[in-house]
Image (cartoon, rainbow, N blue to C red):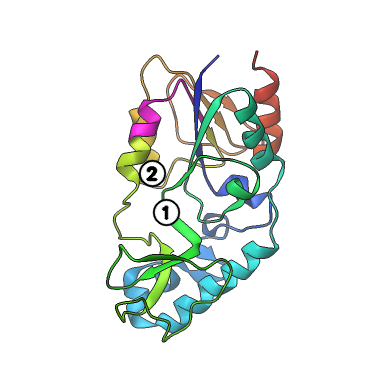
Amino acid sequence: MPAHIVVLSGAGISAESGLSTFRDNGGLWEQHSVYDVATPEAFERNPELVLRFYNERRRQLQEARPNPAHRLLAELENRYRVTVVTQNVDNLHERGGSSSVLHLHGELTKARSSRYPELVYDIGYRDIRLGDCCERGAQLRPHIVWFGEEVPMLARAAELVRSADHLLIVGTSLQVYPAAGLVHEVGCEVPVTVVDPGEPASVSRAQVIRKPASEGLAEWIRSLP
């Protein structure tokens, strides 16, 4: 069995902790169009709305708890090297016990400068308000990769996928690019397992477990030697 399991996780794993996703709501995220709260243009047009939206998501995250799927992935570290590459902006993998997590789309519990993207701050669950500035005087914004922005961690994620001895995909439909393209980085000889109750995009040679994250992960782990 693999020495290195690389996990690609998506919103489906956090949904079991009560965190909703816009794809489950007809293109709405907590009743907001993503174009109103998740693009650079939205922040330029109405920064107060965007900040309020993410402040609410941060408060929601503070109340959420890691679910069995998060804990099962953490427990795998007792037997294997495990790296989680997640599309999620929550910290439930870390709170569930995973020690190696790469966030493709940013992190809710961080803020960054709207003008100097290298200036990133841990803010925990605090609000970001208009007038909150970085050390160089620019307004702070959520440390989130919005639609239309580059994904700075993509190259590192691709390196990790290429190093996998087993690729485990859980809670993602593999329809959001460029993140979905990571599946093409895995070696031809590397086994791939997909855990998702819906109809994930086709991954050749993948073992597919069509169950929710916690149930499907438990079934897969039981099959490991």
Q: Quadrant of residue 216?
A: top right
Residue 164 lies, in percent from the top left, at 43, 25
Describe residue 31's horizontal placement relative to residue 75 as left or right. left
* Residue 129 seen: yes
Residue 4 vertical position relative to residue 136 in the rendered view, above or below: above
Residue 27 seen: no
Residue 50 pos. (x, y %) = 45, 76
Q: Specify the quadrant that holds the C terminus.
A: top right
- Are discs 2 and 1 less than 8 Å apart at CB? yes
Q: Nearer the viewer, residue 73 or 81?
A: 81
Identify the residue shown where x is 44% and y is 30%.
202
What's under tag 1, amino acid-wise? His
Closer to the chain start, of discs 2 and 1, is: 1
Residue 99 location (% of width, % of height): 56, 40
Identify the residue at horizontal 39%, vertical 31% (top origin). Answer: 161
Horizontal side, residue 149 vs residue 96: left or right: left
Q: Nearer the viewer, mark 2 or mark 1?
A: 1
Q: Mark 2 points at which residue?
A: 179
Please give the range of residues in magenta. Answer: 159-168
Query: Callout 2: helix, strand or loop?
Result: helix
